[in-house]
Image: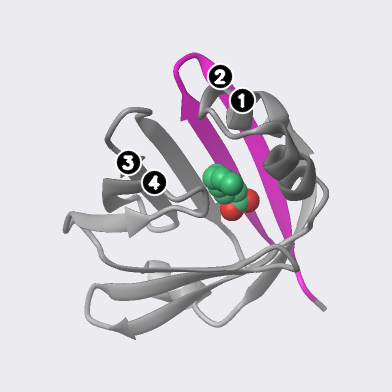
Amino acid sequence: MISRFAGIKYKLDKSENFDEYLKALGVGMLTRKVVNSISPVVELVHNGDSSYTFKSTSTFKTIVINFKIGEEFIQDLPDGRKVPTIITQEGDNKLVEEQKGDKPTTIVREFTKDAVNMTLTTDSVVCTRNYKVVG
Ligand code: DKA
């Protein structure tokens, strides 16, 4: 179960092609500069059954995504867009987030006890971000 990774905090360690990804989403230069310079800490919280919260904390913003696995919801993105989103589970350690709307995006988060490896794809732009366990 993905819930075994709940409560573990991970901090951004490596990021590749993030600026290209943000450009493809239409994020402006000033915001890109800020977002590129921060190292968020992320944590999955299990609220019971298939209900989860994904928290990303940084000096830029705290982002909270409340979701139920397999149920569509409207996500408020940090750049102001509101997009229908669905998060599904693949295998026993991957969450696959599909954001719909003008800029369809897929974000795969693969959890281990030591790391969260993210792959973000929009159009033909692929970005990877690797988080390492804190402490
Ligand atoms: C991450 O969690 C990256 C999440 C990507 C957010 C893209 C939208 C940013 C708009 C300012 O490491």
Above or below: residue 110 compared with residue 64: above
Q: CA distance from mark 3 to mark 2?
A: 15 Å
Where, quadrant-wise, is the N terminus in this rendering?
Answer: bottom left
Tell me which amino acid carries mark 4. Arg
Do we see residue 118 in this rendering? yes
Q: Residue at x 55, y 82 (%)?
A: 7
Tell me which amino acid carries mark 1. Lys
Above or below: residue 88 compared with residue 133: above
Q: Which residue is mark 4?
A: 81
The image shows residue 122 at horizontal and vertical percentages of 46, 25
The image shows residue 25 at horizontal and vertical percentages of 51, 29
Q: Residues within 10 Å of mark 4 (few under 14, many from 20)?
A: few
Mark 2 vs mark 1, foreground winner is 1
Q: CA distance from mark 1 to mark 4?
A: 15 Å
Is residue 120 in the magenta section? yes
Q: Which residue is mark 1?
A: 23
Q: Residue lying farthest left? A: 71
Q: CA distance from mark 4 to mark 3?
A: 14 Å
Q: Which residue is mark 3?
A: 98
* Secondary element at tag 4: loop
Q: Reading the chain from its start, which is encountered first: label 3 or label 1?
A: 1
Q: CA distance from mark 4 to mark 2?
A: 19 Å
Q: Which residues are magenta?
A: 115-134
**What is the quadrant of residue 129 in the picture?**
top right
The image shows residue 112 at horizontal and vertical percentages of 59, 60
Q: Reading the chain from its start, which is encountered first: label 2 or label 1?
A: 1
Q: Residues within 10 Å of mark 1 (few under 14, many from 20)?
A: few
